[in-house]
Image (cartoon, rainbow, N blue to C red):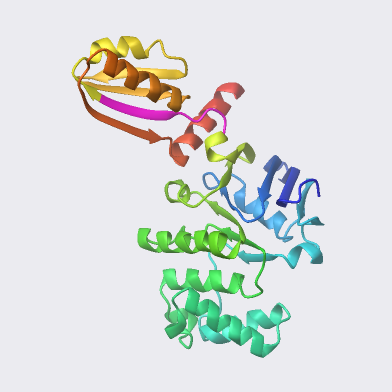
């Protein structure tokens, strides 16, 4: 492996179904001990890529390596825990029996599988539901059971395909809080696929943005292309300050509405230093100063928009 810190390497991966290319030359890396997001709309190719990573299907071209091993090999599979999209199980089985059964399938002795199951159900807040039937659980509880079963073999890498898609906002936040806990407290590597971008930015370290089978960009969110920061300033001399701001390096857009000035910049540190100096030296009265980085959803829309312009 080229880098000892890399858990998953995706190298030029494509997957065709007949004449349809679901994934097109995807390349990115997932670092050990990080939370990595595979994001994009439904149909972007995320689930296909995950199926290749877990060994459920083979790529048409390219290669994925998991901790040095080819995806789908026994060596790779021993590192992976997997929660598929729309996780389900026999509705009549007791939750504990299901967990023990899955542990045994992973090769655990029955007693160890039971102990791990109890610990994981405790961790997910479902200990008191251990002897309820799977079909009696709510959608959020079922999803938490799904995460618990993916962890029963104590894998280094956890792969979650749309884990929060069917949940209410509170359920989504709870699942994502647990994801972050796995990374920060247990040093797990988590790859999470989702089209719900707004909540993901709270937990991700890095991201691959997908659209129509292509990886549009990948890396740390703040490093993806030219991430812009958005500022709103309310002052008593907006016309004067707007003309000054227009000359600043890194500023990509300036507009005003009454006393408010809206600014987009690629160099937030330089902008803040210059504009605050300008306000002090010009005796401008500042009523409000607010800054917001781009959301993951805004980054996605901008990247996809740029890609479409290049193709057009």
Classify 270 as above or below 2: above
Residue at position x 31%, y 18% in the image: 255
> Is 9 contained in the magenta span?
no
Quarter of the image for residue 270 reads top left
Q: In which quarter of the image is the C terminus?
A: top right
**Of 92 and 169, the residue lying toward us:** 169
| Residue 225 sits inside the magenta stretch | yes
- x, y percentage for residue 141? 44, 73
In this rendering, does residue 312 appear at all?
no
**Measured from the top left, where is residue 119 in percent x and y?**
54, 80
Decide if residue 309 is in sight here. Answer: yes
Question: What is the quadrant of residue 148 in the picture?
Answer: bottom right
Vertical position of residue 198 compared to residue 100: above or below: above
Q: Which of 109 and 64 is in front in this view?
A: 109
In the rendered image, residue 262, in percent from the top left (x then y), is placed at 31, 23
Q: In this view, does 146 lie above or below 135?
A: above
- The front one of 245 and 262 is 245
What's the magenta region? 224-233
Identity of the residue drawn at 28% across and 14% down: 281
Residue 210 left/right relative to 20: left
Residue 221: percent from the left, percent from the top? 54, 39
Say how many tags the image has. 0
Which residue is outermost to the front?
281
**In this rendering, would 187 be left or right of 249?**
right
Q: Is residue 174 above or below residue 116?
A: above
Question: Is 243 displayed left or right of 201 in the figure?
Answer: left
Residue at 46 percent across and 80 percent down: it is 135
């Amino acid at each position: 492996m080229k880098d000892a810190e890399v858990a998953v390497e995706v190298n030029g991966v494509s997957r065709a179904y007949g004449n349809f290319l679901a994934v097109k030359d995807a390349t990115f890396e997932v670092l050990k001990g990080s939370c990595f997001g595979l994001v994009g709309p439904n149909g972007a190719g995320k689930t296909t890529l995950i199926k290749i990573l877990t060994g459920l299907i083979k790529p048409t071209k390219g290669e994925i390596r998991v901790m040095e091993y080819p995806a789908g090999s026994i060596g790779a599979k021993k590192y992976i825990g997997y929660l598929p999209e729309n996780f389900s199980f026999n509705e009549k089985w007791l939750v504990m029996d299901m967990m023990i059964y899955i542990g045994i399938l992973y090769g655990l002795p029955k007693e160890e599988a039971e102990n791990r199951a109890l610990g994981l159900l405790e961790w997910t807040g479902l200990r008191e539901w251990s002897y309820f039937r799977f079909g009696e659980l709510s959608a959020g509880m079922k999803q938490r059971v799904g995460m618990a079963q993916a962890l029963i073999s104590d894998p280094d890498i956890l792969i979650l395909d749309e884990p929060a898609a069917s949940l209410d906002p509170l359920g989504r936040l709870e699942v994502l809080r647990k994801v972050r806990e796995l990374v920060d407290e247990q040093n797990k590597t988590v790859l999470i696929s989702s089209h719900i971008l707004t909540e993901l930015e709270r937990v991700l370290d890095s991201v691959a943005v997908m659209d129509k089978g292509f990886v549009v960009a990948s890396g740390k969110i703040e490093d993806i292309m030219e991430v812009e920061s958005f500022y709103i300033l309310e002052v008593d001399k907006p016309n004067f300050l707007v003309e000054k701001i227009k000359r600043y390096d890194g500023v990509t857009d300036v507009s005003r509405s009454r006393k408010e000035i809206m600014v987009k910049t690629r160099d937030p540190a330089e902008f803040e230093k210059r504009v605050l100096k300008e306000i002090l030296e010009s005796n401008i009265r500042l009523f409000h100063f607010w800054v917001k980085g781009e959301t993951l959803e805004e980054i996605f829309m901008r990247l996809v928009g740029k890609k479409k312009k290049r193709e057009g």
